[in-house]
Image (spheres, rainbow, N blue to C red):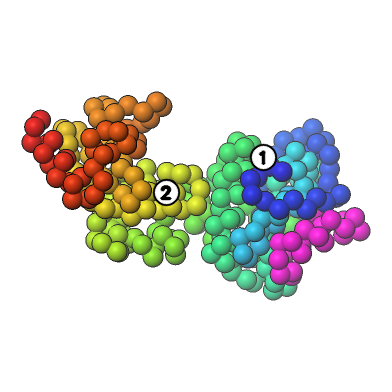
Amino acid sequence: MDEDGVVWIPSPNYFPNRDGHSPKWIVLHGTAGFHTAQEVGYYFQREDSQVSSHYVVGQDGTIVQCVSEKDGAWANGGLTAGHDPWWPTDVNPNNVTISIEHVKPSTDNSDELTDAQRDASFRLILHICQRHGIPMRKADGDGGITGHFSLDPVNRSRCPGPYPWDDLFRFLEEGDMISLSHPEVANYFEDAGPDRWRCKKNGLTIYGAILKFYRSFGGNGFNGLTYLGLPRTGELYPRQGTAVQRFERGIVAYDPRHQLDWPPGSGSVYLLHLSSPYGKAQSANVFSALLQRLSHQE
């Protein structure tokens, strides 16, 4: 399996080793039927189905993998009249693409993605792009991401059907950051101006470099919301050019010159060491008082 956390339901329908080619494009599909990713996977497992895709994303966020990324899936068929002109005509498109099906029970692919399905799809696409160097943008002759309609507008003009393309490319531009567009994140935070979030539970804000760190820290789940929790203080400034903010599960420092600490490999924002004076301050009140006292000593 190429992606962590997927369900492996292997299909016998694939082109071994892509006939020597490498993937340059990701092609998104809708299933136009079926109700679960596993159901689609078992259908692809039948040799007589004569079809497969690399991945299937269920409405509950489950991801099934059916074909290894090193092989070509039987997902795209051939090019038809009106296809995007940059597709190569001298190679089977299945051998230069990675295909992702999205479960859509409606036979016309009219279903919108669920929140769980969208999030799983976005992260899967990000990881595939990172693994293969596929451009994280709308497809063109040099690679990228598109739908089945791009290859076969005659028979697959509604494939994948509705898909949040703008949100996808925004997500890919930001990397694996959480955003306020996700309902779970929006349950705790609201927009408070450019590059600034306000916590709905206590009114405290996160902004700038610490917000960027918070949105990406952890690399899975809901990143900072999962691993740091909610802010317990606003930013405090123990030394000139630094900022420190306490969260429920950790203390984050903005310290580009590493005046407070220097964890190996750290950038300008990092977690403070628990043995530091700031780390030993267990309560928000003690933490704030300590930083204020230290700042007056500078």
**Along the line of sight, the residue nearer the viewer: 281 or 146:** 281
Callout 2, which amino acid? Tyr
Q: Residue at x 30, y 55 (%)?
A: 197
Q: Nearer the viewer, residue 119 or 164?
A: 119
Which quadrant would the N terminus be assigned to in this image? Answer: top right
Among the 4 quarters of the image, the one containing residue 38: bottom right
47 is within the stretch colored magenta? yes
Q: Residue 235, which numbered label?
A: none
Looking at the picture, how far across and down is residue 184, in whole percent? 44, 63
Residue positioned 70% across, 39% down in the render: 23
What are the residue bounds of the magenta stretch?
A: 29-52
Q: Give me the C-alpha separation between circle 1 and circle 2.
A: 34 Å
Give the secondary structure at mark 2: helix
Residue for point 62% across, 43% down: 128
Depth check, front residue: 223 or 81: 223
Residue 94 place in picture, x, y as percent: 77, 46
Q: Quadrant of residue 295?
A: top left
Query: Given the current orientation, which residue lies at the most extreme left position?
Result: 296
Percent x, y for residue 247? Answer: 31, 49
Report the mark closest to the observer, 1 or 2. 2
Report which residue position mark 1 lands on. Answer: 24
Asked if residue 230 lies left or right of residue 98, the reply is left
Q: Is residue 34 left or right of residue 287?
A: right
What residue would you read off at disc 2? 227
Q: Residue furthest right?
A: 48
